[in-house]
Image (cartoon, grey):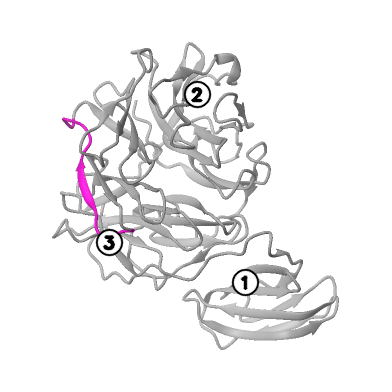
Amino acid sequence: MKKNLLSILGVALTVGAVAQQTPSPFWTTTLNTNFSNLAAGVVYLDAVDASNVWMIGNDGLAPGKFINQFSRTTNGGTSFTSGTIYADTNTYVVANMEGINGTTAWVSSYLKGPQTQGAIHQTTNGGVTWTNMTAANMYTNTSASFCNIVSFLTPSVGMTMGDPVAGEFEIWLTSNGGTNWTQVPGANIPNPLAGEFGLVNVYEKNGTSNYWFGTNRNRIYRSTDAGLTWSVSAAFTSTIGAATGVQDIAFTDALNGICTVFFGPSGSATMTLWRTTDGGVTWTNIPTIDPSFGRSDICGIPGSGWFASSGSAQLNNIISYSTDGGITWNSWGGSNIQYITVDFVSNSVGYAGSFSSQVNPAIGGGWKYSGPLLGVTASNFAPLAMNMYPNPSKGLVNLTLPAAKKGVDVTVTDVMGRVIYNQSKITVDAGEVLSINLQNEAKGIYLLSVSANGEKSSRKIIIE
């Protein structure tokens, strides 16, 4: 049973009809991912650091077909080198990939034919060869085992997770870079629900001790001690329909995260968006998903407290960011580009996976962030309480502060980052109405930023 959630939902990551592409002004660096086939889509992307990025591709001209190829850059995207992982295309299907550095990376996989069991493989020579690092008793149960994830918090400390066997999730840990693996006792893992299993590549890590993974029963398992012990959130609930699965998880730090969860019939399920501020112990539904939210992939932006999202094909072609924990999203602009995956290594370096050319496989396949520094570290600015109304509006927006402030800076920018309104170093009394006139601006989405004396807050403005 293949458990790539996008397939369960009836979504195929395939290249669309050729259209005039307009790059985002904040993502102007083209990446030539160098896969061997035409229209290769970057379905798994792991940016290790500013220089080293690993990715897995699929065949964008054949829905759902992985091509058993990786590609990597060691010079920040200037050039990419591709190669094959397995000796054939009929034994294994890649479940996820993680890079350690420019020469070392890991992949997990399951058996293609029966869609069970699986293995973990490692390369230490830039992908020239891949070595099976699966432990002797790992993923051997022919009826229940299924390998979903391999992940490393440090080059030495890692985890691999598979589906429940005999009523317990199959989780193994290493502390010596994968040379040896020890299975986590079932007593350390909450029991699965009836029919519950993990999902391919649906996981997150943060720091040197935090793991999360999602299941088809809309629960998220969490470990705060590098996988030694686990807890599980309550199942997400909705009136939309039955649980279909957690699609994606992203955290900016150990406490603040977002996730996407599906409900309803397989093949036509409905996406919902949730946030947490306690590390995944509890989750709160964001009742309305912003239209600028990319529905293919999400990630945290290190050093900013912000999130990024990407969208492709049926899931909307967009790349965007959120400054308020996923409640509102701001498009980086551009058009007709399918952003399948996104990953940031800092608040200035990010990568997005797309499709390579349908004519020349050596052209295109991804983008690199080229905009300004993103976000403000929490240690520098505290949240600024403010009220803004009405929103949406016809262009006349009112702003009030609950307490008097001096030295207030008010700035409004459009989706291209251009400043269209600014007032600096003004004094605003408590409850005083500050009117912002944007009636001469075009309909669309704008970003309001207000700061004063070490406090800052941002809001999205929608002009109808």
**What is the C-alpha distance between the residues marked 1 and 2?**
41 Å
Residue 185 locus on image (x, y percent): 54, 15
Of the two numbered discs 1 and 2 on the same chain, state the one appearing first in sequence: 2
Residue 431 locus on image (x, y percent): 84, 76
Which residue sits at x=54%, y=35%? 211
Which residue sits at x=47%, y=37%? 154
What amino acid is at disc 1? Pro
Q: Which residues are magenta?
A: 76-89
Quarter-wise, where is residue 218 in the image? top right
- The stretch drawn in magenta includes residue 85: yes
Residue wearing tag 3: 78
Q: Are the residues tagged 2 and 3 within 8 Å (C-beta)?
A: no
- The stretch drawn in magenta includes residue 288: no
Above-or-below relation of 393 to 177? below
**What is the C-alpha distance between the residues marked 2 and 3?**
43 Å
Quadrant in the picture for the C terminus: bottom right
